[in-house]
Image (cartoon, grey):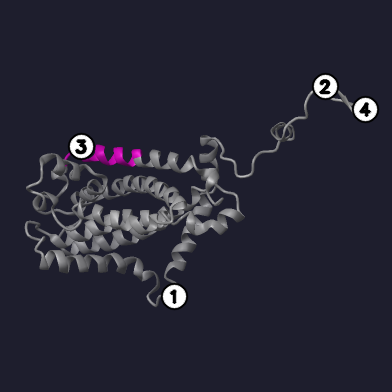
Amino acid sequence: MAQDGITRDRPDPDSADLAARHGLSVSGARPGLVEYIRRLWQHRYFIGEFARARSSAKYTRARLGGLWFVLTPLLNAAVYYLIFGLLLGTSRGVADFVSFLVTGVFVFTFTRNTVTSGVKSISGERGLIRALHFPRAVLPITQVTIQLRQIAISMVVLMVIVVARGNFPDWGWLLVVPVLVLQLLFNTGLAMWAARLGSKSTDAAQWLPFVLRAWMYGSGVLYLVEDRAANAPAWVLNLLDMQPAAVYIDLMRFALMNTENFGTEYLPAHVWLLALGWALLSLFAGFVYFYRAEEEYGRD
């Protein structure tokens, strides 16, 4: 077909063909999964420095500064002790209720804070997302790193408390490290799930704390669940014992405490399999869920 003296033997190439011919790609396009993980690894130093900066800035205007990293969970534990331990009598039946309570509060706080900070990790950094190109998973992982720094400080305080209560160090204390590693993997998956959820729904940051509070009450943070739910069906008790928060709390208590019904000799073998299974399931599912929306973050 000839038009204006020009012969067109085939249609003009479309924009995709032109881009491919000249080596161009869509800005912000999602890379393959392996390449995405590789790029994420390349940003590991940025994650560390970004987390350090955010941690330092968190309490810069407070007179006590970073001391609040320790005071916050301690004050929470003190309030729970007054209300549940003394007023409601949940300390009955627990040989060392102070160690029991503080361990539960510190461990659950690690997961709770990871979720509440993760849900805002994308929505709260839209300016950074639009200004720079980097794997968006950097942001929820940064929040996990911040919470890891806090739990590391809190664990030192926790160990001082349990020693003061007569739980002296033994070989079981070495289990603290693998427990924290497994919980860290679990929390990372939760943070990525919460980050994508928060990027799409501004209400998520409002209703998630209510879900987390209900989760805390069902995780044995403040009392022995089997005592408070003694009349519940067996399957309900089994479900409460096998859910992830209860698993990680129990592992930490059995590692640090050496009182009646606690200590590594009382630890059921299947709990480690549950802890590993929850960690891997959460990490894989959370990462894939977050990765599939990589191109959408910061575009709304």
Which residue has dot 1 on it? Answer: 61
Residue at image mark 2? 9
Question: How far apart are the two marked residues, 4 and 2, measured between alpha carbons?
Answer: 13 Å
Determine whether the residue tagged by mark 1 lies in a helix, strand or loop: loop
SS under mark 3: helix
Rounded to the nearest whole Å, what is the CA distance between mark 3 and mark 4? 81 Å
Name the kind of residue labelled 4 in the image. Gly
Q: Which residues are magenta?
A: 268-281
Q: Secondary structure at mark 4?
A: loop
The nearer-to-camera label among 3 and 4 is 4
Residue drawn at the location 19% of the way across and 60% of the way down: 101
Q: Position of residue 27 (x, y in %)?
A: 64, 44
Q: Nearer the viewer, mark 3 or mark 2?
A: 2
Spatial CA distance of label 3 from label 2 is 71 Å
Residue pointed to by mark 3: 270
Q: Is residue 34 above or below residue 114?
A: above
Query: Of label 1 and label 3, which has the lower sequence position?
Result: 1
Can you see residue 217? yes
Dominant secondary structure of the residues highlighted in magenta in the image: helix
Which is nearer the N-term, disc 2 or disc 1? 2
Label whose residue precedes the other's in the sequence (3 or 2): 2
Query: Looking at the picture, does residue 14 appear above or below residue 95?
Result: above
Q: Which residue is mark 4?
A: 5
| Residue type indicated by callout 3 | His
**Residue 2: within the magenta?**
no
* Tag 1: amino acid: Arg
